[in-house]
Amino acid sequence: MASDGTVGTLGIGAVLTAIGASACCVLPLALGFLGLGSVTLAASLEPFRPLFIGLTAGFLGLGFYQAYRRPKCKPGEACAVPANRRRQRIVLWVVTAISALTLGFPYYAVSLF
């Protein structure tokens, strides 16, 4: 059974790749608010958006697999504690929500600005 670290690492990977997938849209906006002129730098990441979306889905899929599979440990081990598994699942759902909001930014940004 995976420890809390494995699911946490997969969650971090999912969030980072979701940010990478939306960097073409979020980063220019952030740089514009900061008054920086090299906004087109982030727009060059647009061709890599499908790759980042795929990586995000992969990390989230692995995270859900680790969090929801049946534990393979003996009673008394840390992975058998229901509180640990519950925390893993809560963190995973929070990471999934953050990833979904970040990945969807190019679509709802039009209505925000």
Image (cartoon, grey):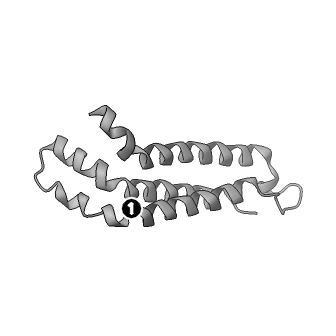
Query: Closest to the observer: 87 or 93?
Result: 93
Q: Along the horizontal axis of the image, is 2 left or right of 5?
A: right
Under mark 1, the amino acid is Arg
Query: Closest to the observer: 107 or 13?
Result: 107
**Residue at (51, 59) in percent of width and height:** 56
Give the labeled residue for mark 1.
49
Residue 24 in percent (x, y) is at 30, 55
**Residue at (80, 48) in percent of width and height:** 81
**Farthest residue, direction right:** 75
Residue 5 found in image quarter = bottom right
Is disc 1 surrounded by few (<14), some (14 to 19) or many (20+) residues within 10 Å?
Answer: some
Residue 7 in percent (x, y) is at 63, 57
Which image quarter holds the N terminus?
bottom right
Q: Along the horizontal axis of the image, is 99 left or right of 78?
A: left
Which image quarter holds the C terminus?
top left
Residue 109 found in image quarter = top left
Q: Is residue 17 above or below residue 111?
A: below
Query: Closest to the observer: 98 or 52?
Result: 52
Q: Is residue 27 above or below residue 112?
A: below
**Residue at (59, 56) in percent of width and height:** 60
**Residue at (12, 44) in percent of width and height:** 35
Question: Which type of secondary structure does the marked residue at label 1 adopt?
Answer: helix
Q: Along the horizontal axis of the image, is 93 left or right of 55?
A: right
